[in-house]
Image (spheres, grey):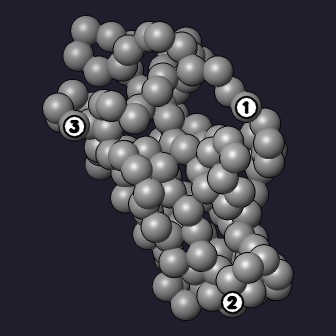
Amino acid sequence: MSSVPITYAGKGKRQAVSGKKVGVGAAPVASLTITDDPGKPGNYIVNCVNAAGDVIDASTIATITVTAADPTTNTPLVTGPNKFSLQGLKSGPATDTIVMTANDGSFGPFTGDVAITITPGGPTGFTVEVNPTP
């Protein structure tokens, strides 16, 4: 398993996905990127980024798992092949690990840690947000 950087531009910031491919015969995956799932607050999309910086839609080529480093802080829920949401359990900082694996085995698995912040509020009693990457 390879460790790769994971970036998040910040709440509401969008990244256009290219029509380019990754894997066999294509540019290798250099990192993963997280964006907000439009119209679904607290939901996120994970995609690949190739060495040229192109964002690659991972929804049909890979799946993810998300695990909380401390399961007493939050519960990650995978809601699609490359989508997840987070449910807060107590306030404070936390770290979750994302693992992305290609469906055909052509790349990965890749793993990276994501810093999150949990604050009181929201419909479940907590608001969970991925921290923007500087």
Q: Amino acid under label 1?
A: Arg
- Comes first in the chain, label 2 or label 1: 1
On residue 116, the disc is none
Q: Is residue 3 left or right of residue 17?
A: left
Q: Is residue 79 left or right of residue 91?
A: left
Mark pair 2, 1: CA separation: 29 Å
Q: CA distance from mark 1 to mark 3?
A: 25 Å
Please name the amino acid that badge 2 sits on: Lys
Tag 1–tag 3 contact (CB < 8 Å): no
Which residue in the structure is indicated by mark 3?
103
The CA span between labels 3 and 2 is 34 Å
In the rendered image, is residue 130 in sight? no
Q: Residue at x 43, y 45 (%)?
A: 82
Q: Amino acid at mark 3?
A: Asn
> Which structural element holds mark 3?
loop
**Residue at position x 66%, y 53% from top?**
40
Q: Label 1, on which residue?
A: 14
Of residues 46 and 93, the one nearer the viewer is 46
Q: Which residue is mark 2?
A: 90
